[in-house]
């Protein structure tokens, strides 16, 4: 629930940066520190300029020198300073100082906060645009524990001064949202871009924690970033917390499996196990440097023209229970996904997919919006160190099994397919238990919704029990037929 303001005036639905800062400054209870490293004191500057900052700002500092920063916040084992670890140390250290130095007896109603950012702006050669971590640790009740919001951003502007100004606006949006939009985290996330646009920055990770956010599912917050166009891809781990894609994928071998996973079936997990075995058997691939990802596209989450968030969480819950890292992307085309991975690694990549997905890749209609058509897409897709593992499918009409040897593509694409197959980049996945090829997620889902029996045997071990226990995908015990 958002805190109330005494004497506040009504402001527009999208207030200016100055009016946001002023509203906070005029609240006699909000009081905290600003610690900013890497781009000046741009957030604090907005509060100083708006007026009445003396009642809000306890301290504003920039520990730019590494030795001085280490003396305050401690050493970083990896020697890196633009990290989530550094940000966490900053916000916790500054809050502890507030608690130590200010008497609660003298300030019983104060709502303490510590805001911090650690960033690197664009380099001199303009080769690296920069990125950063931004976070706030704050109270909404003096007797309550602290809440935290942490996010990661990637700068898009090509001027350091503009990036500094962008960071300052984002900081104000975060602090304002923490105190006035905390009762609606979706609106809070959307407000990060107040007075900003997607050409200025990308936000590719956000995590909420604390007593006021105990019922917030960070996977759903992650989805909001893609849904709102703030980023093209987000990741979360088996524990449900959001991950930074750049950090997880950096210099890794990557194997990606795209699907609807609605729900995850024996076919999905068989594809996973067999493609993993093939991938780890590659000469250039080390298991310790390999990341396997279950990817769901935004279009795969759309139901009846809009995203069904309950359905999304059901899929996420099952994949997380299987110990998988999940990625949500806005990439309809596979080559876009490969391009994205290539931002973080030059190591080997692989895509595991069924026969129908491979047929789609060789369908010219798939590339109508590209000026270079299919050749442009294939140039981007296959000049990388990439392999495709193809999972067979069952042709019920002819009662045959489709592999790379008998896969049929359009007449105009046959020569390209032959050339592609000769390169050795296409590898067939061998399936011994052919009966599982007749398992489809859509069939399982229909059976669950209709209360039919028999769908349990089509799912990996433990998944049916979880669906029943947590009533996922519309399951209801009362509807099961006897």
Image (cartoon, rainbow, N blue to C red):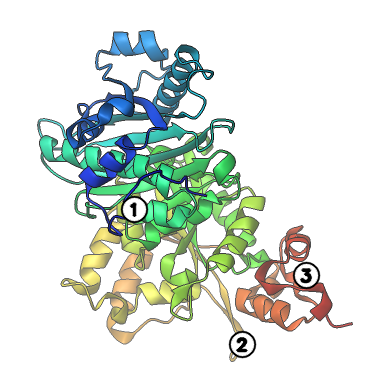
Q: Which numbered circle lies on residue 160?
A: none
- Residue lying furthest bottom in this view? 397
CA gap, disc 1 to disc 2? 51 Å
Where is residue 434, by image quadrant? bottom right
Q: Image point 71% across, 74% down: which residue?
A: 435
Which element type, helix, strand or loop, lies under badge 2?
loop
Out of 348 and 269, give the one closest to the viewer.
269
Question: Residue 92: image x %, image y %?
Answer: 47, 23
Is residue 455 positioned above or below 93 on the image?
A: below
Question: Residue 441: image x %, image y %?
Answer: 62, 73
Out of 327 and 5, give the one closest to the viewer.
5
Q: Which residue is mark 3?
A: 457
* 147 to the left or right of 414: right
Disc 3 or 1, which lies upstream in sequence? 1
Q: Image point 45% across, 27% down: which residue?
A: 88
Q: Image point 38% across, 11% down: which residue?
A: 72
Q: Crowding near pointer 3: few (<14 within 10 Å), some, many (20+)? A: some
* 48 to the left or right of 357: left
Name the quadrant of the C terminus.
Answer: bottom right
Front disc: 1 or 2: 1
Disc 1 or 2, which lies upstream in sequence? 1
Out of 214 and 17, give the one closest to the viewer.
17
CA gap, disc 3 to disc 1? 45 Å
CB within 8 Å, label 2 to label 3: no
Q: Which numbered circle lies on residue 191?
A: 1
Which element type, helix, strand or loop, lies under badge 3?
helix
Q: Which residue is mark 2?
A: 396
Front disc: 2 or 3: 3
Which element type, helix, strand or loop, lies under badge 1?
helix
Q: Crowding near pointer 2: few (<14 within 10 Å), some, many (20+)? A: few
Q: Is residue 347 visible?
A: no
């Amino acid at each position: 629930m958002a805190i109330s303001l005494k004497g506040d005036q009504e402001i527009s639905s999208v207030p200016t940066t100055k009016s946001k800062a002023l509203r906070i400054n005029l609240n006699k209870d909000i009081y905290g520190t600003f610690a900013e490293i890497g781009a000046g004191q741009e957030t604090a500057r907005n509060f100083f300029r708006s007026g009445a900052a003396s009642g809000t700002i306890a301290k504003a500092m920039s520990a730019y020198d590494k030795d001085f920063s280490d003396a305050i916040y401690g050493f970083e084992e990896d020697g890196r300073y633009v990290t989530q670890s550094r940000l966490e140390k900053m916000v916790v250290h500054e809050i502890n100082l507030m608690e130590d130095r200010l008497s609660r007896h003298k300030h019983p109603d104060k709502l303490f906060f510590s805001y911090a950012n650690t960033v690197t702006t664009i380099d001199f050669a303009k080769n690296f645009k920069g990125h950063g971590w931004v976070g706030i640790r704050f109270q909404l009740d003096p007797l309550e524990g602290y809440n935290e919001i942490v996010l990661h951003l990637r700068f898009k502007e090509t001027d350091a001064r503009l990036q500094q100004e962008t960071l300052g606006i984002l900081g104000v949006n975060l602090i304002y949202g923490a105190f006035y939009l905390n009762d609606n985290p979706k609106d809070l996330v959307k407000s990060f871009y107040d007075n900003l646009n997607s050409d200025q920055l990308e936000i590719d990770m956000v995590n909420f924690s604390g007593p006021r956010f105990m019922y917030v599912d960070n996977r759903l917050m992650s989805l909001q970033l893609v849904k709102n166009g703030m980023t093209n891809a987000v990741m979360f781990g088996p524990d449900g917390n959001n991950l930074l894609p750049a950090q997880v994928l950096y210099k890794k071998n990557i194997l990606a499996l795209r699907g609807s996973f609605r729900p995850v079936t024996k076919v999905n997990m068989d594809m996973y196990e067999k493609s993993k075995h093939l991938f780890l058997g590659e000469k250039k691939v080390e298991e310790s440097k390999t990341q396997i990802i279950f990817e769901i596209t935004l279009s795969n989450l759309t139901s009846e023209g809009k995203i069904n968030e309950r359905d999304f969480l059901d899929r996420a819950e099952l994949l997380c229970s299987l110990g998988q890292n999940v990625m949500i992307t806005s990439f309809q085309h596979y080559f876009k996904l490969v391009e994205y991975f290539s931002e973080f690694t030059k190591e080997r990549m692989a895509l595991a997919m069924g026969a129908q997905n491979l047929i789609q890749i060789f369908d010219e209609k798939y590339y109508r919006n590209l000026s270079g058509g299919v050749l442009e897409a294939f140039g981007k897709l296959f000049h990388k160190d990439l392999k495709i593992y193809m999972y067979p499918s069952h042709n019920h009409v002819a009662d045959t099994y489709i592999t790379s040897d008998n896969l049929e593509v359009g007449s105009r694409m046959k020569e390209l397919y032959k050339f592609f197959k000769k390169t050795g980049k296409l590898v067939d996945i061998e399936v011994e238990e052919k009966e599982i090829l007749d398992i489809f997620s859509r069939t399982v889902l229909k059976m669950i919704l209709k209360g039919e029996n028999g769908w349990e045997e089509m799912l990996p071990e433990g998944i049916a029990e979880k669906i029943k226990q947590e009533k996922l995908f519309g399951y209801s015990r009362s509807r099961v037929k006897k």
